[in-house]
């Protein structure tokens, strides 16, 4: 048998066709119902679904700076386990990825790990402070070829800075991924502002703080004819504004996280900071609007906002705790649970929202391709009929802050192929290279 | 019942039994020997991560009258002010064998974190957490209202209460709304719109922005403290305007019905939300609230640690 030939037997393609698929030397060699190949390693995939390798546009890998919470290697492992072949490393590291040096370091560490493509996102402003543009050109022209820029964690709140950023990135065919959070309306905010925050006495985070920035920025991007991506939309009102903007032909795309498709602010009643996240969990009504928006394409993609934190950042009072939750290893299962099993989306749409569309937005040309002969073999296999119970002690991530510990979720990712090489094989990680 | 974290932990029967137990215990406090042996050998820790002299000494007096050993653990000068985590503090208290922890904390939900964690096994009593709840204050307020206004009834059925002031940031208001409603009282919140939480519409209360319209039609006026730090955060133009609309002064006192009472959880800002004349008037039961606080906190400790209410006429 050859390590360069893999024969996937009897799998279901995103469009529902049942077929065999042969990978040879990193490429999809043959797609046909009955392939015979004596040299290939055979994977029986009857009942499983083949997807183009998942692409995450929003990942916190914490390196450099917080290697206690995650490294590019451990995050890549978590990604491979979750079915991802490309991750986008957010810029809020320490030091901040606001210059060519840091983005090249992140890019190089991703290549060394070799389990997924790690594409660094560059900061829009120096130090994520929202005041002065970062060295966007230097990052774009670096080895990392940065195209997505974001101050995520912070909002580019100053309308003039946002305008200049949107204009400047046009030179590099870039896109700004905005963390929509009006800072003055969210000073000290802890959770969604509404009935639950009123009872719990936790400072409210109004939906309007998100929606006001989305509204401002779709108008701005229309005016300067650039490209805007809205990170982690969480409110029904936000979905409405984006729907309106798209109907007007405005060049905006948007993402939703898996957790905002499933969880609500009711969970804050436990005061367990595992449910503390930025932007906050909203109401049932918002969850339903997000699902509808994702299904009808108003929201283009699912992005994980995977945010590892050390245990001391979560084993404390709600106020003291850090914002964020793990997401890479549970993302596809949650999308299956909320969107596929509820008949809102087909697997073909899942392939679009978690692979093709994010790859297109970010310009990751080797990813998100249809599973056709000649394409680079970035492939994820999920067994949708199986289920699993999330165990935080079994995460590949260095952190344990999953809000889904003990949840039973549908769909097990069994294989991930990255450039034709398995990074996840029969549910087991194929280790990355630490050196 | 193992913990007292929120009034929502209580049934009406449990709430009334705490008030009844407090009535019995108040009788003991009025007697020649003020001490009961009930909690001898038990250790109660007052964990005050936020300064509060009055609540701490009230719980301390209550625990001592029940013969418990009391350890005071305050923020200033302790490991808490040196950045020790709540988890490590709890593990320390567990190692010392605390049977109950009375916790005051600036973070909403900190008592529930202690109770839900596996860091310690003792009872947790919320002595005020952030802007969430202050259940022992609500119980002592209900005790005081029952004594003055219930005409011998066991609950507060039909008694009309106005809570006036900074509802948004008030743990006293949140606990009182829950408890007064549980006991059958009719609550009106009076505040500037800026100091009412979004979501208050779902509370079982009436809302008013006009104290003058409300004040003549209630049995109890409960004034809330205006915190110093609110004054420069755009909630109202200045303290003078606040006092003019929401302060309780002699003119408004005249509008109150003749058998109504004035309450305040303390500490008061005399001249801001309440004038000295009103605070010191015959209508004011503010000092009595403090005395009742000890009896009610004895009752809470009794019910949680001695395993049930004190029967009327017993011991």
Image (cartoon, coloured by chain):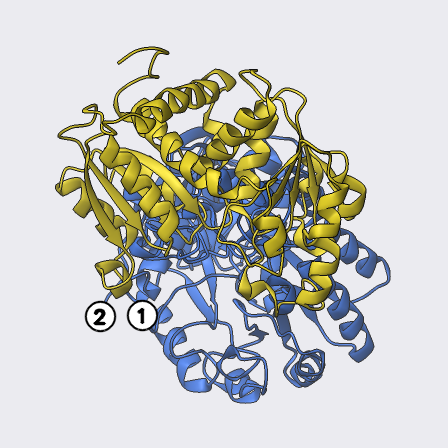
Front-lying residue, A10 or A282: A282
Quadrant assignment, res A112: bottom left
Q: Which chain's residue wears label 1?
A: A
Q: Nearer the viewer, residue A47 or A255?
A: A255
Q: Is residue B51 above or below residue B119?
A: below
| x, y percent for residue A286 | 67, 43
Residue B250 position within the rendered picture, expressed as x and y whole percent measured from the top left:
70, 51
The N terminus of chain B: image quadrant: top left
Rendered residue at 42%/54% (across/down): B106
Asked if labels 1 and 2 share a chain, the reply is yes
Image point (57%, 15%), residue name: B153
* Shade of chain B as shown in the rendered figure: yellow
Q: Quadrant location of the C terminus of chain B?
A: top left
Query: Which of the two residues, A225 or B150, is positioned nearer the viewer here?
Result: B150
Label at residue A435: 2
What letter labels the chain drawn in blue? Answer: A
Mark 1 or mark 2: whose residue is earlier in sequence: 1
Tag 1's secondary structure? helix
User: Chain letter of disc 2?
Assistant: A
Locate residue B66 relative to residue A363 in the image: left or right.
left
Question: Who's the residue at 46% across and 47% down the image?
Answer: A380
Q: Alpha-carbon neighbours of circle 1 within 10 Å: few (<14), some, or many (≥20)? A: some
Residue A316, image x, y percentages: 34, 51
Mark 2 secondary-structure assignment: loop
Q: Which of A414 and B29 is in front in this view?
A: B29
Q: Can residue B122 be seen in the rendering of this structure?
A: no
State the mark number for residue A112: 1
The x, y position of residue A367, in whole percent, is 53, 61
Extreme-right residue of the structure:
A248
């Amino acid at each position: 048998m050859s390590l360069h030939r893999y024969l996937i037997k009897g799998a279901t393609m995103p469009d529902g066709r049942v077929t065999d698929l042969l990978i040879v030397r990193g490429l999809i060699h043959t797609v046909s119902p009955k392939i015979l190949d004596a040299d290939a390693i055979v994977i029986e995939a009857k009942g499983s679904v083949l997807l183009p390798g998942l692409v995450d546009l929003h990942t916190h890998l914490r390196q450099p700076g917080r290697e206690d919470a995650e490294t590019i290697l451990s995050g890549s492992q978590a990604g491979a386990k979750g079915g991802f072949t490309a991750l986008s490393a957010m810029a809020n590291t320490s030091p901040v990825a606001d210059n060519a040096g840091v983005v090249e370091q992140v890019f190089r560490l991703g290549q060394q790990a070799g389990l997924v493509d790690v594409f660094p996102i560059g900061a829009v402003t120096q130090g994520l402070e929202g005041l002065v543009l970062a060295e966007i050109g230097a990052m774009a022209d670096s080895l990392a070829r940065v195209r997505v820029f974001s101050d995520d964690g912070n909002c580019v709140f100053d309308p003039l800075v946002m305008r200049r950023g949107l204009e400047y990135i046009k030179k590099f065919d870039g896109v700004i991924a905005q963390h929509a959070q009006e800072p003055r309306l969210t000073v000290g905010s802890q959770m969604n502002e509404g009935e639950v925050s009123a009872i719990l006495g936790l400072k409210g985070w109004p939906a309007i703080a998100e929606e006001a920035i989305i509204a401002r920025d779709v108008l701005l991007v229309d005016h300067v004819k650039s490209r805007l991506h809205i990170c982690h939309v969480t409110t029904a009102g936000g979905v409405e504004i984006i729907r309106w903007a798209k109907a007007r032909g405005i060049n905006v795309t948007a993402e939703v996280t898996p957790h905002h498709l499933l969880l609500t602010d009711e969970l804050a009643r436990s005061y367990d900071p595992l449910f503390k996240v930025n932007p906050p969990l909203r109401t049932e009504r918002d969850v339903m609007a997000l699902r509808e928006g994702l299904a009808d394409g108003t929201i283009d993609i699912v992005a994980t906002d995977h945010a590892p934190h050390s245990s001391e950042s979560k084993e404390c009072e709600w106020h003291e705790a850090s914002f964020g939750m793990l997401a890479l290893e549970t993302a596809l299962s949650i999308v299956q649970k909320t969107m596929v099993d509820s008949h809102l989306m087909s697997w073909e749409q899942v392939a679009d929202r978690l692979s093709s569309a994010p790859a297109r937005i970010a310009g990751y040309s080797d990813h998100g391709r249809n599973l056709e002969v000649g394409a680079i073999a970035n492939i994820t296999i999920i067994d949708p009929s199986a289920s699993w119970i999330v165990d935080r002690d079994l995460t590949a991530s260095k952190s344990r802050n999953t809000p889904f510990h003990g949840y039973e979720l549908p769909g097990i990712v069994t294989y991930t192929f990255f450039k034709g090489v398995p990074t996840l094989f029969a549910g087991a990680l194929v280790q990355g290279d630490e050196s | 019942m193992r913990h007292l974290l929120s009034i929502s932990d209580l049934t009406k029967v449990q709430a009334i039994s705490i008030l009844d137990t407090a009535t019995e215990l108040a009788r003991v406090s009025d007697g020649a020997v003020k001490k009961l042996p009930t909690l001898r050998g038990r250790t109660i820790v007052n964990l005050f991560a936020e300064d509060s002299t009055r609540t701490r000494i009230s719980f301390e007096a209550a625990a001592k009258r029940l013969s418990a050993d009391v350890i005071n653990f305050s923020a200033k000068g302790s490991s808490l002010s040196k950045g020790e985590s709540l988890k490590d503090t709890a593990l320390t208290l567990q190692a010392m064998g605390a049977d109950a922890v009375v916790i005051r904390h600036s973070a909403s939900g900190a008592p529930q974190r202690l109770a839900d964690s596996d860091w310690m096994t003792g009872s947790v009593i919320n002595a005020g957490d952030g802007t969430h709840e202050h259940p022992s204050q609500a119980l002592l307020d209900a005790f005081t209202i029952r004594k003055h206004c219930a005409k011998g009834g066991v609950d507060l059925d039909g008694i009309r209460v106005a809570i006036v002031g900074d509802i948004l940031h008030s743990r006293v208001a949140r606990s009182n709304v829950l408890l007064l409603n549980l006991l059958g009282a009719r609550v009106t919140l009076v505040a500037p719109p800026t100091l009412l939480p979004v979501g208050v519409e779902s509370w079982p209360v009436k809302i008013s922005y006009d104290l003058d319209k409300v004040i003549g039609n209630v049995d109890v006026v409960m004034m809330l403290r205006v915190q110093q730090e609110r004054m420069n955060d755009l909630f109202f133009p200045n303290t003078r305007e606040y006092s003019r609309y929401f302060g309780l002064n002699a003119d408004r006192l005249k509008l109150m019905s003749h058998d109504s009472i004035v309450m305040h959880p303390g500490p008061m800002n005399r001249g801001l939300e309440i004038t000295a004349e009103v605070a010191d008037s015959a209508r004011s039961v503010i000092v009595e609230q403090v005395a009742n606080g000890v009896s009610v906190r004895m009752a809470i400790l009794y019910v949680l640690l001695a395993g049930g209410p004190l029967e009327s006429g017993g011991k």
